Image (cartoon, grey):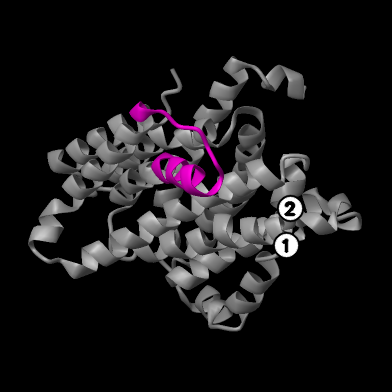
Amino acid sequence: MLKKIDTPLGHWTLLLILSTVWGSSFILMKRGLDAFSFEQVAALRLFLAFIFLAILGRKFYTAIPKDKLFPLFLTGIIGNGIPAFLFTKSETFLESGIVGILNVLTPLFTLFIGLFFFKMKVKLVNYIGIVIGLVGTIYLLLPDIQELNEKVLLYSLMVIGATVCYGLSTHIIKSHLHNLSSVQVTTLAFTFIGPWAGVYLFSGNFIEVMQTHPKAWASLGYTAILAIIGSAICVIIFNKLIKMTGALFATSCTYIIPIVAILWGVLDNEVITSHHIGGFLIILAGVYLVNKRN
């Protein structure tokens, strides 16, 4: 089965699945925020994903390689925990479509981190791609920079910070966890954050919100989809794709994620302007050059 997937067609199929699901995650986070705080949405997402993975990958708890504990810890915290809170917090102010556009920076930071910390070989065209991508980001945020809209810039930096975390995590998986299965990596990584997320969630007023807020059960359902499909299943697919193809190809799902996010945003009556689209296209051109191998 895995050999059938490990083909160019299989790689692109997995990439398309990831892009579609993760492109929908921004609107799911937004719907979760209808009833819950950003902390509750992030913690609930991590906790539910952990419960699902603990059942799915329970056999992996019996023999955890000691030399893999620290990379797994870093993957859990940097690749899943921190981004979950940063993305959800950003959506308390930014439109979900804009968050999806900024997420396209992930491959740029994947290359940047690989260049300086993982001895990744790059070409001149890849450097040009980084510059173009950063120019596109500045262009996208230019109106807010000119108006000194500190709040927009702060929340945008949260999204950018999350993409840096993703870039670092992909290299940790590729460099230090390549000999573990994708299910094993995902299950054990979430073990370092899931239980603590659950403790944090239930130590607050989550139960009270569930009992009193009219949209609580709907928000719970949206967050459960986000957790089980978006965090657990798709992270397994993503980790597998990293091992089969490398960090850069796997993070190229960010080509399509913003398109899906923008479509959901438009359907949800968000304001997406031609300026936003222009910034996205410039960033996309940079990401294309970052991924260019020949």
* Residue 91, quarter of picture: bottom left
Residue 96 position in % (x across, y down) = 33, 52
Residue contact at pointers 1 and 2, CB within 8 angstroms:
yes
Please state which amino acid type lies under the numbered disc 1. Thr
Give the numbered dot on residue 187. Answer: 2
Callout 2 amino acid: Thr
293 over 149 or under it: above or below = above
Between 220 and 230, the residue placed more toward the observer is 230
Answer yes or no: is residue 200 visible.
Answer: yes
Viewer-proximal residue, 128 or 77?
A: 128
Is residue 256 visible in the rendered image? The answer is: no
Residue at 29% over, 30% down: 285
* Horizontal side, residue 39 vs residue 6: left or right: left
Identify the element where label 1 is drawn. helix
Q: Residue at x 18, y 36 (%)?
A: 278
Residue extending furthest toward the left: 147
How far from the left and from the top, in percent, is residue 106? 42, 44
Residue beneath label 1, please? Answer: 191
Asked if the stretch drawn in magenta spans residue 39, the answer is no
The structure residue drawn at horizontal position 56% and vertical position 68%, both measured from the top left corner, is: 43
Determine the secondary structure under disc 2.
helix
Cα distance, mark 1 to mark 2?
Answer: 6 Å
Predominant SS along the magenta part: helix
Q: Which portion, as a residue range, is magenta?
A: 107-125
